[in-house]
Amino acid sequence: MKTHLGTLALIVIGLSASINLLTSADWTWISGGIAALFFTLLEWGSLARVARTMVVVLVAMILILSFTLPNAASVLHQAADRGLYLGLFILSMGILQATAASSPLVHRSGRILVSQKPGRRYAALTFGGALFGLPLSVGAVGLLGTMIKHGNEGTDERIAETRLRRMTVAVLRGVGSVPLWSPTSIAIPVVLLGIPDLSFLKVLSHSAVLAVLFLGLGWLVDRIGNRGLARAGTGHAETELAPLGWFMALVASLLVVAIALAQLLDVSIISANILIAPGASLLWQYVQQRGHGIRKPMREALDIMLRRILPSLRNLRSEVTIFMISGALGILVVPLVDAEALSAAILPYASSSGAALAIAYVFVLVTGILGLNPIASVTVVIAILTQLDTFDLRDIDIAMTVLTAWAATVAISPFTSNVRIAANAIGEDPTKVGLRWNVSFVLVVSALFMVRCLLIR
């Protein structure tokens, strides 16, 4: 019964947010908000500590605003809409990720990447991790991490440890670049919701360059840091690259359909991507079942969707809660920010726009390493920076700062899903994988980005 009720609540959240997205209906925040409250209470005992903490913070902020703000109802309405939108995002991406994780095509493509010869293995894994991150998100880390673990079995212990480290950080850096460019990453919607004057294509025109530099810098750090090490193969390298080609075609088709739907419905590409994900997943399941020789592939695909994938979304209870609350906090924090007082407080430490951006970058990275989810820190930072009049901050500079900080955080923090899932897949400690194995890369990224920020006047 609890499973059915939880799944029903998530469906109501998703439908309410979808209707609001397509029609801008005013009533959807009520149905969606009630469903979100019911789901939170139902799953309270299973929520992660950070999710429960954020619920308490949200309740406190709602009470404060209710008693101090004349137009509190309007602000709460906007906050609920924002939270439900991000809830719909994680649910839609969860459906897509569950389908991709069960796909034989994805698994064959992953084996191709892991089995490459030493000379091109790092590049294959880091760029492959970025590619896999589009449909799988953080699931790409678990999938490739498991393959890395199996690929190193039966190898000399010293060589295996070195190769395990290099292959793991390659995947972490590849998937870590996803927040910079992917419409399936939560980072882009958080930024676009906080800075509505920006479009996805505007962000992509700048962040795609940063993503390439991020990946290339990771490769360079690996080459310099591992000079003189013996190169050992993982065995027979896969030469049949057709599955990888089909996978790339699938990823490209998802983007093309999202762009076309965005034009048709006059919505953002991110919103279009959210809307097509469930349908694309169903079609993907249909093709898979047909490939297995099932006589009624659509019926089987629907059965998998209704009986397996939708109920499994309850496992995302903490993520759904954190995402929705983070979205709501981005709206609720604005009336509480005294822009003039904050500007005066920051001015002694930030004499220019670039210095203010550098402080914001460090804040997101350091709080992420200490355990604060980037969704929350980035949401708050954007809300504050966009209110500051003392500094002439460009929207695109704010976006690039928080996105780069987000990418660096998920590559190093032992509290992020990326690092924890990677560590679990290979049987290592998250602190070792994040803070020890990847610290040199993140320090180089941060130093270079600090220089870039300080050049901004």
Image (cartoon, rainbow, N blue to C red):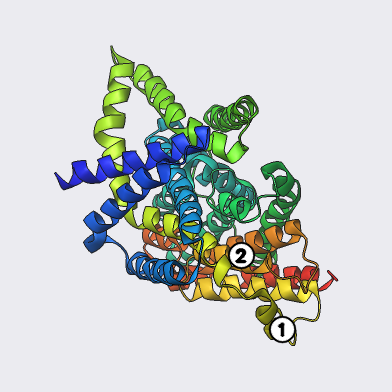
Using the image as rendered, state which of residue 368 and residue 245 is in the foreground. Answer: 368
- Residue 294 visible? The answer is yes
- Asked which secondary structure carries label 2, the reply is helix
- Marks counted in the figure total 2
- Residue 155 visible? The answer is no
The residues bearing labels 1 and 2 have C-alpha atoms spaced at a distance of: 17 Å
Residue pushed farthest front? 70
Quarter of the figure that contains the N terminus: top left
Label 2 Cα crowd, 10 Å radius (few <14 / some 14-19 / many 20+): many
Q: Say which quarter of the image contains residue 241.
A: top right
Image location of residue 30, percent across then percent down: 37, 46
Q: Say which quarter of the image contains residue 242.
A: top right
Residue corresponding to mark 2: 383
Compared to residue 269, the image places residue 146 above or below, namely: below
Image location of residue 267, percent across then percent down: 61, 34
Quarter of the figure that contains the C terminus: bottom right
Image location of residue 212, percent across then percent down: 71, 51
Using the image as rendered, state which of residue 165 and residue 295 is in the foreground. Answer: 295
Label 1 vs 2, first from the N-terminus: 1
In this picture, residue 205 sits left or right of residue 436: right
Residue corresponding to mark 1: 344
Q: Residue at x 64, y 63 (%)?
A: 402
In this picture, residue 116 sits left or right of residue 79: right
Kind of residue indicated by mark 1: Ala
Kind of residue indicated by mark 2: Ala
Q: Residue at x 74, y 87 (%)?
A: 348
